[in-house]
């Protein structure tokens, strides 16, 4: 009896010790059994095995932390898989300030970007480029050599200064310039990074002379921002122009005649050593077929109708005739 | 609701939660033994665990990004640290809770200090240690969700996505998922404890809070503090 | 570590101590979130824990339920409440209250349930009623553990109240969330340092409270056991 229970105990302890040892080993090893949700397996190719390199030969498609970018990333993933390319998705990374250093060093290889925002946030904060052509030229000139943008699509999703319909009516607003006299009584909201970005508060001050009463950090044009606008906690907010609630909540995005917000076409940003011509041709095909109305319709599907990203992406790819 | 994604993230959540607790155990046992052996070591160690435990988990994750990137390791290191904070006091307390007469009897029977530690003190400390491990595992599994804020996705991803799309079902599913995973892990540990401590299968003998004793709950204040630790 | 020096630079800079988002404001907000949550949690958990300990029923349930309770992800609960109920006090308060309850409840229960049976016998022998035993014997003897539960709960809430920044509120979490969004890791580290300091201060306050509230002989006894 006694020896039996002792050996049971030894067995269980040995089991726990083995589990712990295996866990330690699994941490440091590259394995496909590691949860696919984040690519942490080191490869012989990447310089920092702990920093999230993916198995060699796969394209790591990342996305920022808002639904539209994740949707675009999902489209990229499916189209690339349809072309027989191995893909590792890495969604919901964070704001550009978080994921840009990652793509710079190749931990991510592809991410759906917005050319103007990319330029003014991370590449050249002093740039005055405004139109698509100017922005693309500036990017091509100023991006680090390992990165490049592919062909931009006509689809745009821009930051904006948006107000409620009631507020616009009350102050007869159609353009950002008209905010000058009332800005100091207004609280403006946006994602936390809006405070420091060059096309955020800083740009609004430089381009339009606006000094707001205060800034309220909210979210990425999501329910927190929209609720704050509706409840009057903020009088204006940075709402992305393809946000479906602009239509359903009757919001007004003010005109931006001085191009504080540069053109923001959807464009794939790639880490050159991580992609080949097959990858770039698939991504260019997607960009060619993407339009702003199409993007808006998909945004409505995922945000208002709560359809799964995979289904919406698959539906669009099928409709435009790209294999997935 | 994308169920295949759900199961993937659930598996990730379980793995990312359990592993740091186990690693924490592996580290906590020798550290605890050292703290019992060299009494002066314990107060500074205890103070350190108090300080570390007060650090917001997200802050710790973010600070590590520069060093360990956006992969699993950025999550695993802080979670292991937090587990340590719970487990070291429990190991110390478990060892200290071994009654002196038992220790003396072992010495009288000819057990050297190492053998006494391995065959008498550690086994008797098991209930207290496992009580701490249960807490560490449950807290860990729950904390993994915060990693979604830096893109290390688990069931926490559905909190972010669910918030952005006002998608209730996702959030419910993720909360329930996390609780179920944690409870399963807890149950397994309770079974493990029963297997490892056949002598305590008869209900609470020491007269102090019968229910608490059979639940393996430690009784000294320090241990209760550790027991109460959670996030 | 370099981020500590970033934190120090950030903390030193006068911009943090003035203006609309200054540290004093954030600390006050943070203390407000923590204090309110702790008070509400105590109002729920203290009576419950004491009564369960007194009547001796449901103790098993309490201890094991507390463990299940700890599994509830605070971020998840917060997000769920936002999506269901929008933005009001309950939305941000409830997750913190839920977080603090297990620590307060379990310790209150342990404290009262662990009162020496002989002590209660003696009190009964002296003619005390049930209610008097509770008030004059059990609760005072349980005070060290009750205070410990409150202290533990307070520390959890101080550390976790940083989460409120995720839904656009204030508090010290603002530095962590904003710092993350702008890759200003000095801000993140600075915010974390402030949270830790605040938590340590809370500990000190509770140690002081314990000194005031718990009679000396009980303090010594609790230390010795």
Image (cartoon, coloured by chain):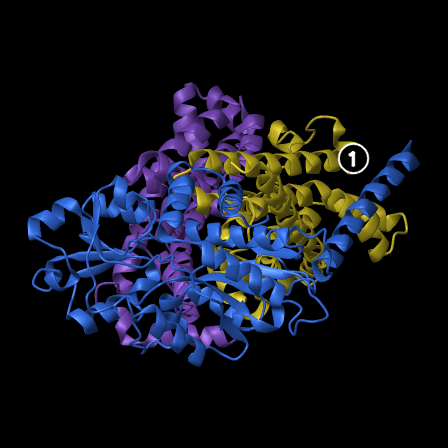
Chain colours: A blue, B yellow, C purple
Q: Secondary structure at mark 1?
A: helix
Q: Quadrant of residue B3?
A: top right
Number of on-image labels: 1
A225 sits to left or right of B89 = left
- Mark 1 sits on what residue? B195
**Residue for point 21% across, 68% down:** A204
Q: For the point 49% across and 48% down, which residue is it?
A: A320
Q: Is residue C128 visible?
A: no
Residue A179 visible, this orientation: yes
Is A128 located above or below residue A19 in the figure? below
Residue C170, placed above or below residue A209: above
Question: Percent from the top left, x then y, of residue B155?
Answer: 54, 44
Q: Residue at x 33, y 60 (%)?
A: A192
Left or right relative to B70: residue A177 = left
Label 1 packing within 10 angstroms: few (<14), some (14-19), many (20+): some
Please name whichever residue, C125 or C66, is drawn nearer the observer in this view of the structure: C66
Q: Position of residue B98 (x, y in %)?
A: 72, 45
Q: In front: C1, or B4?
A: B4
């Amino acid at each position: 009896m006694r020896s039996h229970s002792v050996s049971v105990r030894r067995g269980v302890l040995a089991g726990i010790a083995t589990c712990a040892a295996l866990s330690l080993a699994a941490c440091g090893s590259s394995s496909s059994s590691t949860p696919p949700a984040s690519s942490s397996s080191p490869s012989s190719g990447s310089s920092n095995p702990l920093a999230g390199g993916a198995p060699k030969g796969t394209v790591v498609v990342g996305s920022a932390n808002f639904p539209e970018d994740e949707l675009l990333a999902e489209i990229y993933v499916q189209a690339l898989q349809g072309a027989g390319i191995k893909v590792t998705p890495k969604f919901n990374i964070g704001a550009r300030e978080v994921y840009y250093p990652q793509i710079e060093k190749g931990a991510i290889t592809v991410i759906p970007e917005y050319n103007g925002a990319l330029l003014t946030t991370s590449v050249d904060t002093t740039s005055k480029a405004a139109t698509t052509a100017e922005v693309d030229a500036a990017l091509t000139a100023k991006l680090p050599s390992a990165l490049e943008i592919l062909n931009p699509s006509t689809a745009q999703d821009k930051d904006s200064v948006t107000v409620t319909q009631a507020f616009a009516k009350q102050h007869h607003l159609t353009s950002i310039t008209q905010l000058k006299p009332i800005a100091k009584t207004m609280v403006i909201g946006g994602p936390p990074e809006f405070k420091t970005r060059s096309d955020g508060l800083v740009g609004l001050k430089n381009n339009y002379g606006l000094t707001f009463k205060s800034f309220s950090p909210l979210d990425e044009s999501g329910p927190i921002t929209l609720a704050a606008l509706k409840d009057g906690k903020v009088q204006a907010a940075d709402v992305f122009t393809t946000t479906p609630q602009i239509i359903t909540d009757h919001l007004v995005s003010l005109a931006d005649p001085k191009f504080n917000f540069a053109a923001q076409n959807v464009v794939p940003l790639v880490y050159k050593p991580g992609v080949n011509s097959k990858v770039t041709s698939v991504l260019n095909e997607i960009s060619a077929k993407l339009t702003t109305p199409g993007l808006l319709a998909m945004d409505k599907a995922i945000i208002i109708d709560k359809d799964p990203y995979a289904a919406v992406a698959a539906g669009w790819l099928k409709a435009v005739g790209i294999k997935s | 609701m994308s169920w295949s994604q759900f199961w993937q993230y659930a598996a990730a959540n379980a793995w990312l939660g359990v592993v740091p607790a186990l690693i924490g155990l592996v580290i906590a046992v020798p550290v605890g033994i050292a703290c019992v052996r060299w009494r002066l070591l314990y107060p500074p160690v205890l103070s350190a665990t108090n300080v570390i435990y007060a650090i917001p988990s997200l802050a710790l994750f973010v600070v590590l990004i520069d060093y360990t990137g956006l992969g699993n390791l950025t999550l695993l290191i802080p979670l292991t640290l937090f587990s340590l904070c719970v487990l070291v006091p429990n190991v110390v307390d478990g060892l200290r809770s071994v009654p002196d007469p038992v220790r003396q009897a072992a010495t009288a029977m000819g057990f050297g200090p190492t053998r006494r530690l391995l065959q008498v003190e550690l086994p008797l400390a098991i209930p207290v240690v496992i009580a701490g491990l249960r807490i560490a595992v449950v807290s860990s599994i729950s904390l993994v969700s915060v990693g979604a804020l830096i893109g290390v996705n688990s069931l926490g991803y559905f909190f972010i996505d669910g918030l952005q799309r006002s998608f209730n079902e996702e959030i419910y599913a993720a909360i329930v998922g996390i609780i179920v995973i944690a409870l399963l892990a807890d149950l397994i540990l309770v079974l493990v404890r029963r297997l490892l401590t056949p002598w305590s299968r008869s209900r609470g003998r020491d007269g102090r809070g019968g229910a608490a004793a059979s639940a393996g709950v430690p009784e000294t204040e320090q241990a209760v503090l550790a027991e109460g630790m959670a996030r | 570590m370099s981020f500590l020096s970033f934190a120090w630079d950030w903390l030193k800079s006068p911009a943090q101590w003035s203006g609309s988002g200054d540290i004093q404001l954030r600390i006050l907000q943070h203390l407000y979130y923590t204090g309110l949550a702790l008070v509400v949690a105590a109002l729920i958990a203290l009576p419950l824990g004491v009564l369960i300990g007194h009547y001796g029923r449901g103790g098993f349930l309490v201890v094991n339920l507390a463990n299940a309770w700890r599994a509830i992800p605070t971020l998840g609960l917060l997000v769920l409440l936002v999506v269901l109920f929008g933005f009001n006090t309950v939305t941000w308060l409830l997750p913190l209250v839920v977080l603090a309850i297990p620590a307060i409840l379990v310790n209150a229960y342990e404290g009262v349930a662990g009162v020496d049976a002989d002590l209660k016998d003696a009190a009964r022998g002296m003619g005390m009623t049930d209610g008097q035993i509770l008030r004059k014997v059990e609760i005072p003897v349980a005070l060290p553990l009750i205070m410990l539960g409150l202290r533990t709960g307070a520390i959890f809430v101080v550390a976790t109240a940083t989460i409120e920044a995720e839904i656009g509120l204030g508090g010290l979490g603002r530095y962590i969330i904003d710092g993350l969004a702008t890759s200003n890791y000095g801000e993140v580290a600075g915010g974390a340092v402030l949270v830790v300091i605040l938590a340590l201060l809370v500990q000190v306050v509770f140690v002081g409270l314990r000194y005031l509230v718990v009679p000396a002989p009980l303090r010594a006894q609790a230390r010795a056991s």
